[in-house]
Amino acid sequence: MKHNLLFILFLTSLSTLAQPPTEVVNIYDYEKVIILELTANGNDWNIDVQKVCEGIPTKSLVSDRSITMNFMDEEGKELYSVSVSNPKLMQMHSESNAVPTTREFPASTTIVVPYSPKCVKVVCSKEHEANEDIEWIKSFDIQKAVQEAYETFVSQ
């Protein structure tokens, strides 16, 4: 009787080893993403690649914000596009006729986009705003920074 019970336990342990591995369910829609920071200091704008990790990309269903960021491959094909608010604009709600004002100190915003090894540059365009007469298009080469961030992510 004692041997039969041990044999049954042994067979039970073998059957758990023979089962296929269970699939991990990604309930939060995590994927490989690039985290970037768009900084503005006066007229000097810059993009810094913070890291590559698992996360959820910034969704931009409404593309009416003042800064449009287009992520491009080497051939100039758009991989991803996101629209963000100007980090230098600030709405003053204490006044009855609140007009957006521009901050004169450094400001930044964080953007999370899907990772792609093909992503080589970001083209940012800033539309004309009510209190600013400046429109511009700036291009930032991020290929090397993205590659280094991805290598750091993989090595962890």
Image (spheres, grey):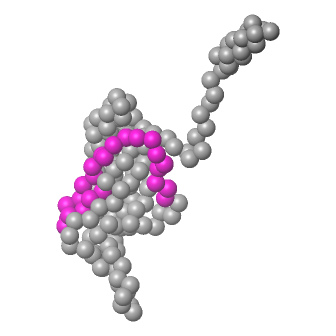
Is residue 84 shown to the viewer in this render? yes
Residue at coordinates 20% horizontally, 70% vertically from top-left?
A: 105
The image shows residue 134, relative to residue 77, as above or below, that is below
* Residue 105 as seen in the image, left or right of residue 101: left
Q: Is residue 47 magenta?
A: yes
The image shows residue 102, relative to residue 123, as above or below, that is below
Q: Residue furthest top?
A: 3
Residue at coordinates 49% horizontally, 56% vertically from top-left?
A: 59
Is residue 11 shown to the viewer in this render? no
At which x and y percent is residue 113? Answer: 43, 48
At which x and y percent is residue 128? Answer: 34, 71
Q: Quadrant of the N terminus?
A: top right
Residue at coordinates 46% horizontally, 54% vertically from top-left?
A: 58
* Residue 121 as seen in the image, left or right of residue 28: left
Start-end of magenta stretch: 38-60
Q: Residue furthest bottom?
A: 96
Q: Is residue 57 magenta?
A: yes
Question: Magenta span: helix, strand or loop, mainly?
Answer: strand
Closer-to-camera residue (18/72): 18
